[in-house]
Every structure is written in structure tokens, then in C-alpha cells.
Image: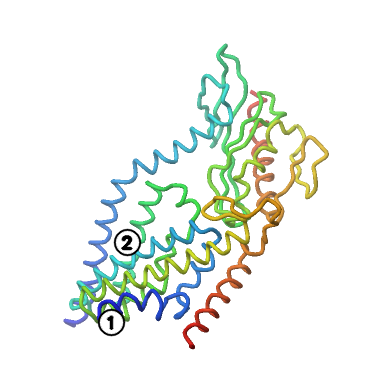
């Protein structure tokens, strides 16, 4: 009996001390971590839409969409966050499109845990650049050779799954948002 | 005494190349030199502080629950590393992904706590932890470097191979990890046999 109490006591004590210690450390770092995440997002929006003078946030259902305005106050496009399943985990993409939702301006990968050295090349410039001025009035397609249509991108060699994931995530979100935004 | 205690982890009882422990992170994160090095250093930190605490409380922990207690302690330090990387080095944190939390189940750490820190004095335990930790770190750094050079033509992100070099993509893939690790272990055995 005495042994049992000692076992329970020590284990509980160790857990309580560790939990206390961790919550203390986490409280110290939380602001910084949130700041980092926000910064990544802000920088990505800026890279996607360098000409935007004003960015406003609007809620559309569960999504947050950023409306971009130029210095005359005209709407020049939208930035939205799309996420979905990649090869290993979630991929989060920030994408910019023009106001009529038929041309993509560019994408930034905010978060992904794709295979280092292969799938994570979706974060590389060569892959992302393909989405600049991509036609999205038709669904985006991926091909394994040089694309010959305006709505096609070239998948990364050895990382077709990750490339396809990006394309599917974008197509799904574009469809959802187009209906919501254009009917307004 | 303490010198051999330190050196054994670096060479004679190298955790990766002699004991073949911690294979999961070894094979998974060493796609680039910097990833291997960061993982190695994270393990040095966790191993050092876990050994410190385990050695400190070894007399009060009941034998039956020692593994549970060690695991909680290790998990605490791993979470600290994880939070620290997220706050200070978000890039590295993103590159290592789920493998930082998985240090909790790295058998080198639990192994050293159970086999060494819980049975030796504090000073010996800390020296042992540093030796094993840095042994692990150089193993991963070397493995990551070889794979990065052959698989991507660069080292620490800087291209060193001539333009004409066609990277061997297989080296970045899991198969490349097994190949290089196997060769490293073979070379190590060869040297030790003499």
C-alpha cells in the first residue's frame, strides 16, 4: 500500500511540475510564435500583391478573404487561403486572383510538411512561378511535360502527388469562392 | 575515466553507427546537412537535460514507474525545443516538421537515461549525454551532407557541384538514406576490426 501511494505520488508530482514548467515556457513564446505566423502570412500577401495599397479582410462563410485595392480605391483582386491534404500532411496555400476570378496572380505556400528535397519543391520559385497569370476559368490541370495550355502547370518530377495536391486544393477553393463572391 | 566516457559516444559506442539506435530520425531528416545538424543539436539538448534530471531524481523514483517518469521528463524537454524552434527558427522548425516532437520516442535518449543516467553520478551522466549527443549529431550531419551533395549538388544550401552534374534524386529519397547509412556502418566496422 505504501509503495502504491509512493508510485502515484511521484508520478503525479513529476507530471505536475513538468506541466507547470511547460505552460510557463509556452506563455513566454506564444506571442513570438503567433507573430511569426502572422508575419509569414503578411509577407506572403505583400509578395503576391505588391501593387495593393489597401488590404481589407472580409469573411465569407468560414473563410477569410483579403480584398486588394489600388491607390485609386479600385478592387484589383482577392487573396485567399486554401488548405488541404498533401502527400504527408496539410498544405496551406495563399493565392491571389483577379477580381473576375478567371486569372490567377500567384501563390505562396504558407505551410507544408511535404518530403524534404522532393515534395517541398512546391515551395520553390520555379514551381510557384507557374501560377502567375494562370487561367483559372477552366480548372487548373497538371501535366508531366511542358504545358501547352494556359490552364496547365508542370508537375514536379518525383513529386506528382504533392503537385496534384496543390492543384486540387486550389481548384476546390476557387470553385467555392467564385460562387460565393460573384453572386454577391 | 571521464575522457573515455565522453569519447565512447563519439566513436567506440557511436549511437548511430555502432549501436544502430535512433534510426527513424537518422533516416528521415537527413535529406540536407542543415536538417541533420539541427536534429542532432536538438537531441544533444534534450539528452543533456534529461540525463541531468534523471540523474538528479534517480533515488526517489520508484523502480516500477521509472520509464513513465523518464518519458514525461524527456517529453517536457522535447516540447521546450519544439517551442523554441517555432519561436526563434521558424524555418528550421518547418523543415523538421513532425520529427522534433518525435524525439520523445528516440531510443537513444531513453536508452541513455535508463542504462546510464539512472545508475551513475551526475557528472558522469552529463559527460555521457554530451558524448552520445554529439556522436549522434556528427553522424546525422555527415549523413545529411553526403545525401545533399549527391542528391542536390549542394552543401548547407550552397551549390558546389558543377552545373553539368545531374543530381541523383534517389539519394534524397528514403532509399538513399539506407544506402548511405549502410555504407557508413560498413566503413565504421571495417575501421574497428583492424
x and y percent of residue A114 in the render? 58, 54
Looking at the figure, which quarter contains the C terminus of chain A?
top right
**Label 1 neighbourhood size at 10 Å, few (<14), some (14-19), many (20+)?**
few
Residue nearer the viewer, A33 or A100: A33
Q: Earlier in the sequence, mark 2 or mark 1?
A: 1
x and y percent of residue B46 in the render? 34, 64
Do the residues at discs 2 and 1 belong to one chain?
A: yes
Circle 1: element type: helix
Q: CA distance from mark 2 to mark 1?
A: 22 Å
Q: Is residue A162 left or right of residue A12?
A: right
- Residue at image position (44%, 37%) is A38
Quadrant hosting residue B132: bottom left
Look at the picture and state if B179 lies above or below A101. below
Q: How is the image coloured?
A: rainbow
Tag 1, which chain? B
x and y percent of residue A28 in the render? 28, 46
Circle 2: element type: helix
Residue nearer the viewer, A122 or B127: B127
Look at the picture and state if A169 lies above or below B174. above
Q: Which residue is mark 2?
A: B77
Residue nearer the viewer, B135 or A117: B135
Tag 2, which chain? B
Q: Which residue is mark 1?
A: B64
Q: Is residue B157 left or right of residue B165?
A: left
Figure disc tally: 2
Residue at the right extreme of this rendering: A148
x and y percent of residue B114 in the render? 32, 79
Amino acid at each position: 500500500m505504501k509503495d502504491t501511494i509512493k508510485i502515484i505520488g511521484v508520478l503525479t508530482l513529476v507530471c505536475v511540475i513538468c506541466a507547470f514548467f511547460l505552460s510557463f515556457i509556452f506563455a513566454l513564446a506564444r506571442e513570438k510564435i503567433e507573430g511569426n505566423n502572422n508575419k509569414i502570412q503578411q509577407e506572403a500577401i505583400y509578395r503576391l500583391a505588391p501593387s495593393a495599397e489597401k488590404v481589407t479582410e472580409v469573411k465569407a462563410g468560414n473563410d477569410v478573404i483579403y480584398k486588394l485595392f489600388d491607390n485609386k480605391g479600385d478592387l484589383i483582386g482577392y487573396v485567399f487561403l486554401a488548405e488541404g491534404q498533401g502527400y504527408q500532411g496539410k498544405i496551406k496555400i495563399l493565392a491571389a486572383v483577379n477580381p473576375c476570378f478567371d486569372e490567377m496572380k500567384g501563390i505562396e505556400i504558407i505551410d507544408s510538411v511535404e518530403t524534404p528535397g522532393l515534395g517541398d519543391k512546391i515551395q520553390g520559385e520555379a514551381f510557384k512561378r507557374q501560377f502567375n497569370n494562370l487561367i483559372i476559368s477552366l480548372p487548373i490541370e497538371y501535366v508531366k511535360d511542358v504545358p501547352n495550355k494556359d490552364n496547365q502547370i508542370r508537375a514536379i518530377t518525383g513529386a506528382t502527388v504533392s503537385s496534384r495536391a496543390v492543384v486540387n486544393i486550389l481548384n476546390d477553393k476557387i470553385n467555392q469562392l467564385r460562387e460565393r463572391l460573384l453572386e454577391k | 575515466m571521464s575522457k573515455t566516457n565522453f569519447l565512447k559516444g563519439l566513436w567506440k559506442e557511436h549511437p548511430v553507427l555502432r549501436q544502430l539506435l535512433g534510426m527513424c530520425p537518422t533516416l528521415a531528416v537527413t535529406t540536407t546537412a542543415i536538417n541533420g545538424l539541427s536534429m542532432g543539436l536538438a537531441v544533444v539538448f534534450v539528452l543533456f537535460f534529461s540525463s541531468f534530471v534523471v540523474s538528479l531524481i534517480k533515488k526517489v523514483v520508484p523502480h516500477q514507474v521509472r520509464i513513465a517518469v523518464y518519458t514525461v521528463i524527456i517529453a517536457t524537454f522535447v516540447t521546450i525545443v519544439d517551442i523554441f524552434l517555432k519561436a526563434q527558427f521558424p524555418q528550421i522548425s518547418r523543415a523538421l516538421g513532425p520529427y522534433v516532437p518525435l524525439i520523445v520516442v528516440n531510443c537513444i535518449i531513453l536508452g541513455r537515461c535508463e542504462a546510464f543516467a539512472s545508475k551513475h553520478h551526475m557528472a558522469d551522466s552529463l559527460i555521457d549525454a554530451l558524448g552520445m549527443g554529439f556522436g549522434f549529431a556528427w553522424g546525422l550531419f555527415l549523413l545529411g551532407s553526403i545525401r545533399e551533395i549527391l542528391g542536390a549538388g549542394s552543401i548547407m544550401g550552397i551549390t558546389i557541384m558543377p552545373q553539368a552534374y545531374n543530381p541523383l534524386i534517389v539519394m534524397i529519397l528514403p532509399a538513399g538514406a539506407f544506402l548511405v547509412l549502410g555504407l557508413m556502418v560498413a566503413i565504421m566496422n571495417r575501421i574497428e576490426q583492424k
